[in-house]
């Protein structure tokens, strides 16, 4: 495995397309594949089980698996299955998702999302690292033993200081998403370190999400983010994060050029490589890229993924 892990978020139009995309990413030398809870793939962990059997080395991670919709014992057992097929390659990124979708679709009582997430992490990490759990909390009860620990890393999504601190205290890593890179460096990383220090443990990895596009047309790349990641600034959790990062009222403005330039990594191969390497230089452990396409989408995606693989191997 390369020293620099730079993964890609895999589009999920259908299961066969996902499997093809993951196989292609591995062939190109990309060393990690991530999936969100969206698209028509149905369930990320299910398709990862198939991908694990069809690939050799690429890491497989959820970013994110929604905590409200699946008991942590069930998630641990699913991860156990994939880990048995592909040892050391599955990683669980979990998070509470958004109030609107969780209440309207699943009817959950979306209260205390951070407290809920903390208990979920404790149960999952207990099962992963110890192979057993006896837990009675405010939101969850869990009493179960597996045949052996799986040592599947349990990471969590984080946007604001308290969630990064919680990841530092409890999780095996934190995953940002469309956060301005300066915010991740100056706010998120110190919060992650503070949480770990308070718990008396080493700082866990920080997986830094960034939209990436190798192109000479910056305006097309900006518009690609608007089209492909457009709704995030208008949702409450992300609007509060953007306000803390210096972009007030993003729920009203949507993506401004200034916001896009704080998040997007775009330019020539040399420019994108330099910006990716900067993330590792200031303390990012890994990069999770959303490949933004412009013009001929297939050729654009191949160009960007080729550069990602090259930087990973450098």
Image (tube, grey):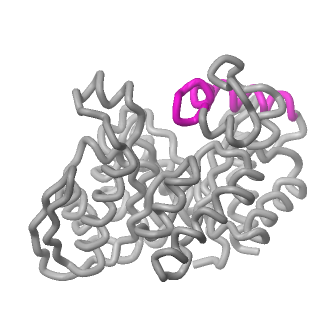
Q: In this view, does 307 lie above or below 13?
A: below
Quadrant assignment for the N terminus: bottom right
The foreground one among 219 and 167 is: 167
The foreground one among 303 and 40 is: 40
Rendering coords of residue 51 (x, y %) = 37, 58
| In this rendering, position of residue 108 left or right of residue 240 | left
Residue found 23% across the figure and 72% down from its top? 127
Which residue occupies 63% across, 77% down? 2
Q: Which percent across, then down, holds residue 173?
A: 49, 66
Above or below, comparing residue 45 to residue 5 in the picture = above
> Quick check: is 236 in the magenta stretch?
yes
Residue 273 x, y percent position in the rendering? 82, 60
**Magenta extent:** 218-239
Q: Which residue lies furthest to the top in this view?
A: 252
Asked whether 20 falls inside the magenta stretch, the response is no
Question: Measuring 50% from the left and 68% from the top, which residue is drawn there?
Answer: 168
């Amino acid at each position: 495995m390369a020293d620099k892990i730079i993964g890609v978020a895999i589009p999920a139009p259908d299961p066969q397309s996902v499997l093809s995309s993951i196989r292609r990413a591995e062939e190109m030398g990309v060393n990690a594949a991530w999936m969100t809870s969206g698209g028509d793939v149905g369930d990320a962990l299910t398709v990862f089980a198939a991908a694990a059997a069809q690939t050799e080395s690429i890491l497989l991670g959820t970013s994110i698996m929604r905590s409200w919709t699946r008991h942590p014992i069930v998630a641990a057992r699913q991860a156990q299955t994939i880990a048995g097929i592909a040892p050391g390659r599955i990683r669980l990124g979990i998070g509470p998702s958004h109030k609107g979708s969780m209440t309207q679709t699943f009817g959950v009582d979306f209260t205390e999302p951070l407290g809920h997430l903390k208990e979920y992490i404790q149960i999952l990490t207990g099962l992963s690292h110890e192979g057993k759990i006896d837990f009675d909390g405010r939101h969850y009860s869990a009493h179960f033993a597996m045949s052996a620990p799986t040592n599947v890393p349990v990471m969590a999504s984080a946007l604001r200081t308290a969630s990064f601190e919680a990841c530092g205290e409890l999780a095996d890593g934190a995953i940002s998403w469309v956060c301005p890179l300066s915010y991740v460096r100056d706010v998120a990383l110190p919060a992650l370190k503070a949480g770990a220090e308070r718990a008396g443990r080493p700082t866990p990895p920080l997986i830094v999400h960034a939209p990436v596009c190798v192109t000479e047309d910056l305006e097309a790349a900006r518009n690609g983010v608007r089209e492909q990641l457009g709704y995030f600034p208008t949702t409450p959790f992300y609007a509060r994060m953007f306000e803390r990062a210096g972009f007030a009222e993003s729920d009203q403005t949507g993506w401004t050029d200034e916001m896009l330039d704080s998040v997007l990594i775009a330019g020539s191969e040399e420019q994108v490589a330099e910006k990716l390497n900067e993330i590792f230089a200031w303390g990012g452990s890994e990069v999770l890229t959303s490949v933004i396409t412009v013009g001929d989408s297939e050729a654009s995606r191949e160009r960007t993924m080729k550069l990602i693989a090259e930087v990973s191997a450098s």
